Image: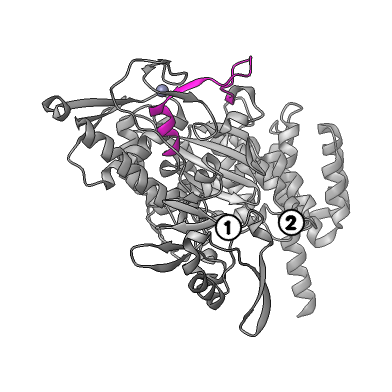
């Protein structure tokens, strides 16, 4: 017996895989919630639990139950309020029928485990095999409705009348294949915890270690298994699933703890904070999750302040990172919280670079009935750049919300097409690429009448991401100055067609010819900045020079038109 109480060590190694390591963090956080006397120690590359075997076993089991009730077995506000859709069970001790709201797994948990709830204790089958056909008409609030009313088996016949009475009074329907006894049904993926004893049955496909308990790898271990991308597949070529150990299988269930998510129709976007150091992942867990938000309908667990139409992966990623920036680095709590707060550099350092860099794994999954397709998985490694960019932009008084709104194309009739360009712009921003061409095309196509914030944003952004061999700052300034002058003059004296004619030019020579024509037409109200003829416009930079000129040109044109309309009215 003494042998039984001896302390043993149970080690969970950090695998270096973003999914399993997210699960490892989840296990650490859930164990912290358990009142336990086992020792928990986290280092850079592993979690070590120390204590008597039984204590380890029961602590992990308790942690798992906390996980299930916080992430899998949930009810939305709607499911809670709609009492007529409640389920029920019979409590044998209290001799009572007890109603309870329907349950479902949401967000990342729904990707790990998307199955119907099962009885938590036991179930007594109805007398009839075709129980669904046992209908009865009842009256609820004066309305007649059909409800399923099968019979209890003969052993429990005496309960029948009370049960029917209980159900009829509440207008409840029967949706389970039998009477639930002594507990509700619940969403709880199966796990096996088998510490220590037993000979090795082979090596785990994921962690490579020998294990006393192996199981087939499936969605509940890593849901992107069925993804279209071969990189994400764990199935070997023969099609036979690989084997994983009980520890890796267990960790797979804990992933939702670490993640942020947003669901949009059949699409789920998930963001998993990740670092090469497990200690770092533990360090940043609490500050990061300050950005967490509880949506009553559980569609998402972060609340971005950037407005509508966020539905594609890159714009949602942008919105997620922006939420962290505002909530954690600016300490702004609500959308209305617009006070001019300053970036908390210490927090930023703590979050991003201290000890080890912090990355975010971005996942886009699409659910098709029971299966989930992995559409995209990529690591975002530039959070420092992104937070600095937002800070620099907002310090100059530009409202990022306004910029994001201006990138919506309201001329598109279909809602799903309104933010196509914005998604591409967000992708470029996240990848530190130019957005010049997209922005130029957008302002002309979307018929924007006022977009100064967008122009200001563009100029700051481009100056940050441009490389040395790109257009120089002076060249860029010349283009912008020229654009402003063209727009002002054409807006005052000319026609919008003049702008289009300039925009249509394909070479530097054509472009200069159009400028000459404009000068001739508009006379003294239009002067070309000297830089244009002094080498700031070249054959090489023409492709960039032109959009840098055309965006401010349209903006100034709109402003001039607005002014002259107002002038005409007064
Ligand atoms: Zn393993």
Q: Is residue 49 above or below residue 454?
A: above
Question: Which element type, helix, strand or loop, lies under badge 1?
Answer: loop
Q: CA distance from mark 2 to mark 1?
A: 51 Å
- In the rendered image, residue 348, in percent from the top left (x then y), is placed at 36, 42
Q: Which residue is mark 2?
A: 415
Between residue 535 and residue 224, name the one nearer to us.
224
CA neighbours of label 1 inside 10 A, class few (<14), some (14 to 19), many (20+): some
Location of residue 131 in the rendering, given as x and y in whole percent from the top left corner: 64, 58
Read off the magenta span: 232-254
Q: Is mark 1 within 8 Å of ligand 1?
A: no
Question: Which residue is painted at 37% across and 52% down in the image?
Answer: 290
Quarter of the picture for ligand 1? top left
Among numbered discs 2 and 1, the one appearing first in the sequence = 1
- Kindly identify which residue carries mark 1: 127
> Toward the viewer: 563 or 284?
284
Q: Is residue 168 left or right of residue 499?
A: left
**Residue 70 position (above or below residue 469):** below
């Amino acid at each position: 017996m003494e042998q039984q109480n001896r302390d043993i060590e149970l080690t969970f190694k950090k695998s270096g895989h973003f999914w399993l390591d997210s699960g490892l963090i989840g296990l650490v956080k859930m164990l912290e919630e358990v009142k336990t006397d086992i020792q928990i120690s986290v280092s850079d590359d592993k979690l070590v639990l120390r204590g008597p075997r039984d204590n380890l076993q029961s602590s992990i089991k308790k942690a798992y139950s906390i996980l299930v009730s916080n992430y899998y077995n949930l009810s939305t506000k709607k499911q809670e309020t709609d009492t007529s859709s409640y389920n029920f069970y019979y409590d044998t001790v209290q001799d009572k029928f007890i109603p309870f709201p329907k349950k479902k797994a949401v967000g990342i948990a729904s990707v790990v485990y998307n199955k119907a709830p099962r009885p938590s204790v036991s179930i007594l089958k109805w007398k009839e095999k075709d129980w669904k056909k046992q209908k009865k008409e009842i009256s609820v609030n004066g309305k007649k409705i059909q409800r399923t009313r099968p019979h209890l088996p003969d052993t429990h016949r005496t309960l029948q009348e009370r049960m029917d009475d209980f159900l009829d009074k509440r207008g409840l329907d029967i949706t389970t294949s039998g009477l639930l006894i002594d507990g509700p049904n619940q969403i709880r993926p199966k796990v096996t915890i088998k510490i220590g004893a037993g000979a090795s049955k082979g090596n785990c496909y994921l962690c490579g270690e020998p294990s006393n308990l192996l199981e087939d790898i499936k969605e509940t271990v890593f849901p992107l298994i069925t993804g279209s991308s071969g990189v994400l597949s764990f199935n070997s070529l023969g099609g036979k699933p690989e084997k994983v150990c009980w520890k890796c299988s267990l960790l797979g269930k804990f992933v939702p703890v670490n993640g942020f998510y947003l669901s949009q129709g059949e699409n789920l976007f998930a963001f998993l904070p990740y670092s090469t150091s497990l200690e770092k992942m533990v360090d940043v867990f609490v500050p990061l999750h300050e950005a967490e938000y509880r949506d009553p309908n559980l569609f998402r667990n972060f609340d971005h302040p950037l407005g509508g139409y966020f539905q594609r992966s890159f714009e949602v990623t942008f919105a997620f990172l922006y939420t962290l920036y505002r909530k954690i680095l600016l300490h702004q709590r609500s959308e209305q919280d617009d006070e001019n707060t300053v970036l908390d550099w210490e927090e930023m350092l703590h979050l991003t670079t201290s000890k080890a860099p912090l990355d975010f794994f971005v996942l886009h999954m699409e659910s098709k009935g029971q299966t989930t397709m992995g559409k995209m998985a990529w690591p975002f490694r530039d959070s420092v750049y992104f937070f600095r960019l937002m800070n620099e932009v907002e310090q100059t008084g530009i409202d990022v919300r306004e910029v994001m709104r201006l990138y919506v194309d309201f001329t598109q009739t279909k809602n799903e097409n309104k933010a196509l360009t914005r998604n591409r712009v967000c992708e470029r921003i996240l990848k530190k690429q130019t957005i010049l061409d997209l922005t130029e095309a957008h302002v002309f196509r979307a018929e924007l009448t006022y977009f100064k914030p967008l122009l200001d944003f563009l100029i700051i952004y481009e100056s940050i991401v441009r490389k040395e061999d790109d257009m120089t700052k002076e060249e860029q300034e010349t283009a912008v100055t020229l654009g402003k002058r063209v727009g002002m003059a054409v807006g005052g004296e000319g026609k919008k067609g003049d702008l289009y004619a300039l925009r249509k030019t394909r070479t530097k020579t054509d472009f200069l010819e159009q400028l000459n024509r404009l000068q001739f037409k508009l006379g003294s109200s239009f002067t070309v900045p000297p830089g244009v003829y002094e080498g700031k416009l070249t054959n090489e930079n023409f492709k960039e020079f032109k959009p840098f000129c055309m965006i401010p040109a349209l903006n100034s044109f709109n402003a001039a038109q607005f002014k002259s309309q107002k002038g005409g009215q007064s």
